[in-house]
Image: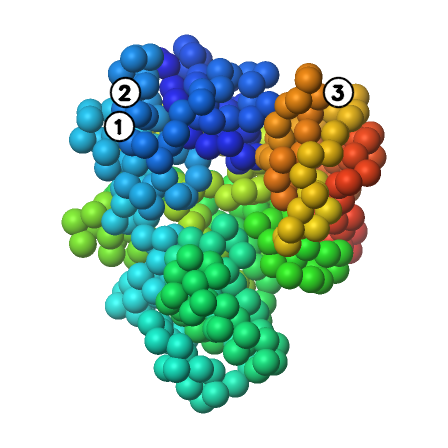
C-alpha cells in the first residue's frame, strides 16, 4: 500500500526509516519531511493544517494508510477528518488526543479513575493560581494546560520562580492562559509506551530521556536532549504495575466516554517510593524516544500500527533486539532559547557510515546541496550496541565526526544506565 507519514522531525525520520523497510509499504510519502527523510521517501510540500488538502492528496496518490507523527495535527482533529473521508489513520481522534492537548483534562481523568498522579489544582484565573501557590509553597510544578512543545513545564524550587511561571502562562506565553499546578514528586523518570486499539493494550519497550539542556541534568527543560532504551529502572514488575494502575484505567476511561483511544499512548512516569505515578501523557511516539525504539524493533512496524486501527491488537505481538539503543541530540547554540539558524553541517556521511549508527534529521534544510541547520534540535545521532557503554561510545564517536561548530550536545546521555551497568 501507499503510506503517508505526517511530520518533519527526528521522530518522523525514525518512523519513516522503519516504515520504509516494511514489506507492506509500496510507496512512502512524508509531509513535509526533511532532507534526511528525502533519502528514503518522497517529501511532499503539503500544508498539514489544511485537512481538505491532505484528504485530496491521499485520494490523488491512492494512499491506503496515514500515520500522524506529531501531536498538533491529532489535537486539531486530523484523524477525525481522515476517518470521515474513509481513509485509515494511525493516531487518536481529537477528543482522546486531549490527553496531551490539555493537562487539566488528563488530571481530571486521573482523579475520577483513581490513577496515581501528583496532587493538583487547575486554574483559569491568575489570582486563584497565585493563591494556591502561596498555600502550598515550593518546590512545586507549574504546567501550561495546552501544547507547548515540551517547554511549558516549570519545576520551581523557590516561590519567585513559581510565581514567574504562573505569570508567563497567564500572559499566554505558551498559547494557553490556563495552568495546572502540581505537587512536586521525587524519583527517577521513565517513558512507558503502549499501542492500543481502544480496548487492548500492547506494551512496547521502555526508554528514558534527558529533558534538561545541560550535563548533570542542569539548566532549563527542553524537548529532549537524548534518550536510551531499554530503561533499566523499569523492571518487569514496574511495567506491569504501570500498565494495570495507570494505562489500562485510562484506556477504559476513554472507552467509557465513548471516545476510544486508538494509537500509541506515551506515559511519562515518575518512580516514587510509593510506586509509579503519571507525570503526563503524550498522544504520539516520543521524540527522541522513537529514535531508540525504532532502532530496537524487530517486528514490522506497519503491521503493528494497522492492528491498532483494525481493532486486532490482540492478534499480534512485538519483539525487540536485546541491544541497547542510544541517541544524542545535537542542537543549535542558544537552544532552548533563540537559536542560531543557517549554519552548515559537514561530515554527516562519515558519521553515518560508522557501524551501528543511524543519523536522524530533526531540524535541517538544504541550500545549494549543503545541509543547513534550521531549528533548535537539529540532529539525532543514534547508535546500537550490546551494552550501554558500547552504544554510547558509538554515538559520541559519530558526534565527533560531525563538523558543526555552531552546534552542541550533552556529553552524559545515559549516565544513570551506565552507572547501573558498571556497578553490576
Label disc, if present, on residue 349 of the rendered structure: 3
Label disc, if present, on residue 3 of the rendered structure: none
| Residue in the image at 54% along x and 35% along y | 9
Decide: is 416 above or below 404.
below
| Residue in the image at 68% along x and 17% along y | 369
Decide: is 142 above or below 411.
below
Instruction: State yes or no: discs 1 and 2 in contact (Cβ < 8 Å).
Output: yes
Choose between 320 and 260: the one closer to the eye.
260
Q: Nearer the viewer, mark 3 or mark 1?
A: 1
The picture places residue 208, in percent across and down from the top left corner, at 59, 50
Which residue corresponds to mark 2?
56
- Mark 3, secondary structure of its residue: helix
Which residue corresponds to mark 1?
52
Chain-order first, disc 3 or disc 2: 2
Tell me if 420 is positioned left or right of 46 in this view: right
Q: Picture quarter containing residue 263?
A: top left
- Mark 2, secondary structure of its residue: helix
The picture places residue 20, in percent across and down from the top left corner, at 49, 18
User: Badge 2 local density, few (<14 within 10 Å), some, or many (20+)?
Assistant: few
Choose between 34 and 5: the one closer to the eye.
34
Mark 3 → mark 1, Cα distance in angstroms = 38 Å
Whether residue 313 can be seen here = no
Q: Picture quarter containing residue 154?
A: bottom right
- Colouring used for the render: rainbow
User: Badge 1 local density, few (<14 within 10 Å), some, or many (20+)?
Assistant: some
The picture places residue 98, in percent across and down from the top left corner, at 32, 53
- Mark 1, secondary structure of its residue: helix
The picture places residue 294, in percent across and down from the top left corner, at 54, 32
| Residue in the image at 29% along x and 31% along y | 51
Choose between 37 and 298: the one closer to the eye.
37
Amino acid at each position: 500500500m501507499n503510506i503517508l507519514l505526517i511530520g518533519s522531525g527526528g521522530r518522523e525520520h525514525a518512523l519513516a526509516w522503519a516504515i520504509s523497510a516494511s514489506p507492506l509499504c509500496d510507496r512512502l510519502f512524508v509531509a513535509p519531511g526533511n532532507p534526511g527523510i528525502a533519502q528514503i521517501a518522497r517529501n511532499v510540500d503539503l500544508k498539514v493544517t489544511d485537512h481538505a488538502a491532505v484528504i485530496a492528496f491521499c485520494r490523488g496518490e491512492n494512499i491506503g494508510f496515514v500515520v500522524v507523527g506529531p501531536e498538533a495535527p491529532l489535537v486539531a482533529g486530523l484523524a477525525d477528518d481522515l476517518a470521515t473521508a474513509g481513509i485509515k489513520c494511525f493516531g487518536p481522534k481529537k477528543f482522546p488526543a486531549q490527553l496531551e492537548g490539555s493537562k487539566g483534562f488528563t488530571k481530571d481523568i486521573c482523579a475520577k479513575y483513581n490513577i496515581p498522579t501528583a496532587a493538583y489544582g487547575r486554574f483559569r484565573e491568575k489570582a486563584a493560581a497565585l493563591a494556591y501557590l502561596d498555600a502550598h509553597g515550593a518546590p512545586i510544578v507549574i504546567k501550561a494546560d495546552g501544547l507547548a512543545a515540551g517547554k511549558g513545564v516549570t519545576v520551581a524550587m523557590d516561590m519567585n520562580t513559581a510565581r514567574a511561571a504562573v505569570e508567563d502562562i497567564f500572559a499566554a506565553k505558551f498559547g494557553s492562559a490556563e495552568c495546572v499546578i502540581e505537587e512536586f514528586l521525587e524519583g527517577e523518570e521513565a517513558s512507558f509506551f503502549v499501542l492500543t486499539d481502544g480496548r487492548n493494550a500492547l506494551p512496547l519497550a521502555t526508554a528514558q530521556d534527558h529533558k534538561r539542556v545541560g550535563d548533570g541534568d542542569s539548566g532549563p527543560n527542553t524537548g529532549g536532549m537524548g534518550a536510551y532504551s531499554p530503561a533499566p529502572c523499569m523492571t518487569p514488575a514496574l511495567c506491569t504495575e504501570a500498565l494495570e494502575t495507570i494505562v489500562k484505567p485510562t484506556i477504559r476511561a476513554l472507552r467509557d466516554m465513548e471516545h476510544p483511544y486508538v494509537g500509541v499512548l506515551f506515559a511519562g512516569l515518575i518512580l516514587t517510593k510509593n510506586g509509579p505515578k503519571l507525570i503526563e501523557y503524550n498522544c504520539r511516539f516520543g521524540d527522541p524516544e522513537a529514535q531508540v525504539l525504532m532502532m530496537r524493533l524487530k517486528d514490522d512496524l506497519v503491521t503493528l500500527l494497522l492492528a491498532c486501527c483494525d481493532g486486532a491488537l490482540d492478534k499480534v505481538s512485538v519483539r525487540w533486539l536485546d541491544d541497547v539503543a542510544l541517541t544524542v541530540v545535537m542542537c543549535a547554540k542558544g537552544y532552548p532559547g533563540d537559536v542560531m539558524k543557517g549554519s552548515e553541517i559537514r561530515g554527516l556521511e562519515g558519521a553515518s557510515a560508522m557501524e551501528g549508527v543511524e543519523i536522524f534529521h530533526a531540524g535541517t534544510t538544504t541550500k545549494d546541496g549543503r545541509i543547513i541547520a534550521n531549528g533548535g534540535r537539529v540532529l539525532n545521532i543514534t547508535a546500537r550496541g550490546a551494552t550501554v557503554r558500547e552504544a554510547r561510545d558509538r554515538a559520541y564517536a559519530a558526534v565527533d565526526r560531525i563538523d558543526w561548530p555552531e552546534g552542541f550536545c550533552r556529553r552524559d546521555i545515559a549516565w544513570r544506565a551506565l552507572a547501573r551497568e558498571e556497578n553490576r
